[in-house]
Amino acid sequence: MSNSKFNSTCHQNKDKLSLMNWIRNLVVFAMLWLNIVLVYGVICAHTNELGQDEFYRFLFFLRHPVVIILNSLSLIVAILFSIMSCISLSKAIINRYPNFKRLQIGVFIILMLAIGMISRQLVIIALGYLG
């Protein structure tokens, strides 16, 4: 009886680990895709010999349905990775300091708020430089 219970819990943990591994592997491809898009945008920002700006090519590229789908998937993967990282970090903090086990949700919320505030500041800085 206990052996089957052990096998079922190991199987559940293996499923969770495989989901985390899938998301970790997808993060690599998502960030690679976003970097390719960024490099293409920088290349398109260059003016040609006639002095014409070719940034419109990048805008038409971004409007392509396949690019929209890949950008959306990359964003979803990045958000899931951030959430899973915060969850694992809060679990690591709780395992290190077992007296704070009741505060695991609070640690998770604080980490998500910190990530959100840092992201907000980076966007404001980037828009300030663009404007």
Image (cartoon, rainbow, N blue to C red):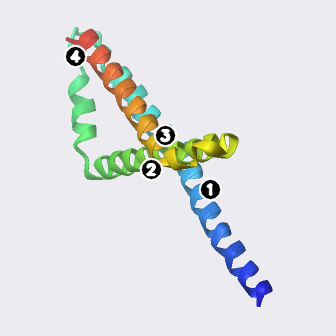
Taking the image as shown, residue 22 lies to the left or right of residue 73, namely: right
Label 4 to label 2: alpha-carbon separation:
37 Å
Find residue 80 and name its label.
2
Q: Residue furthest right?
A: 3
The answer to whether residue 51 is above or below residue 106 is: above
Find residue 53 and name its label.
4
Taking the image as shown, residue 74 lies to the left or right of residue 5, namely: left
Q: Which residue is mark 3?
A: 107
Q: Amino acid at mark 3?
A: Val
* Front-most of residues 113 and 17: 113
Residue at horizontal 22%, vertical 8%?
51
Label 1 to label 2: alpha-carbon separation:
12 Å
- What percent of the width, then of the height, locates residue 49? 29, 9
- What percent of the width, then of the height, locates residue 6? 75, 78
Assign a secondary structure to mark 3. Answer: helix
Q: Which residue is mark 1?
A: 21
Mark before the other along the chain sequence, 4 or 2: 4
